[in-house]
Image: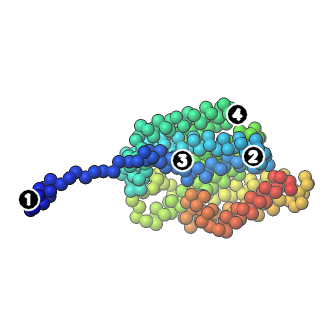
Amino acid sequence: MPERISTALEHPRPHRTARPGPLALPLGLLKTARPRQWVKNILVVAAPAAAGELFSRQSLTRLSLVFVLFTAAASAVYLINDARDADADRAHPTKCRRPVAAGQVPVPVAYAVGGCLAVLAPVTAAFLCTPLTAALLAAYVGMQLAYCVSLKHVLVVDLTIVTTGFLMRAMIGGLALDIPLSRWFLITTGFGALFMVSAKRYSEAVQMAATTGKPGATRALLTEYTTGYLRFVWQLAAGVAVLAYCLWAMEEGGSTTGGSLLPWRQLSMTAFILAILRYAVFADRGTAGEPEDVVLRDRALAVIGLVWLAMYGLAVTDW
């Protein structure tokens, strides 16, 4: 008996590692595509909503298709970005858990799936939507890939590209439905996006300055910005967005003509300004992270947003 025990101790059985299940790769690809970020693509309804042409069956069908195509294009960028940064992500304390860095999704597979989505999204848009929709999707993919490769390391350009990505989301719904995009819509949306992007960068810079900061724990380019500069950017962007919105409301909603019971355009200025001011509280504190997280975390901001949506809806429908 002792001889058997010693033999077992000297020659232990090899440890068997668990094999990944059949769904490991699909789930890894889905996680790499960042489903949480898909919420941002709801912006595709912005232009049709602003024009009051959102609730027809044709519009909803076309916008659903555009939402899927833009989601595919954005997911393609995430897949290619993670494949390209796999080696660097493995050395990162948190990014090492990403499926590509962790080995759940092989790098060639991530490149292949990302490349297919990057090509299929604009091609599908060319056949099922308008040529301008396909062109904008192709431009978005090209711009975001250039951002991943080099432009994310260029001061100011990185803010511009992220902001332009939001603006493209807001524009594509109008292009898909052949809706003219007004100058006030473009200015308000563009500077509103810049406000949120720069507020997020400012919050990251404040949090980094408040801690010792670990190498690679945040964006490398962030160390080249000053908190004073980022504060200036988000304050400037907020001011321009408010001014453009007010000019739109005063220009097109100066009276109650058109069947409206009240001047909803003018009244919606109050809710819009309150929403900007409330969001600026979190920006000033350095706690303005992802926009959707800020809105969902603060009940007052969510209520103000709903009130603004109601007023805006009544304005564009001339109720």
Instruction: Work out whether residue 123 or residue 261 is closer to the camera in this orientation and state it.
Output: 123
Report how far apart the C-alphas of labels 4 and 3 lie in the structure. 29 Å
Report how far apart the C-alphas of labels 3 and 2 lie in the structure. 28 Å
Secondary-structure class at tag 2: helix
The nearer-to-camera label among 3 and 2 is 2
The amino acid beneath tag 2 is Pro
Report how far apart the C-alphas of labels 4 and 1 lie in the structure. 80 Å
In primary-sequence order, the first of circles 3 and 1 is 1
Q: Position of residue 246 (x, y in %)?
A: 77, 56
Q: Is the Cβ of the residue at disc 3 closer than 8 Å to that at disc 2?
A: no
Label 1 sits on residue:
3
Q: Position of residue 315 (x, y in %)?
A: 82, 55
The amino acid beneath tag 4 is Thr
Secondary-structure class at tag 4: loop
Label 2 sits on residue:
48
Label 3 sits on residue:
158
Q: Position of residue 37 (x, y in %)?
A: 56, 51
The structure residue drawn at horizontal position 75% and vertical position 55%, both measured from the top left corner, is 245
The amino acid beneath tag 3 is Asp
In primary-sequence order, the first of circles 4 and 3 is 4
Left or right, 3 with reference to 277: left
Image disc number at residue 130: 4
Left or right, 31 with reference to 160: left
The nearer-to-camera label among 2 and 1 is 1
Left or right, 121 with reference to 5: right
| Residue 50 shows in the view | yes
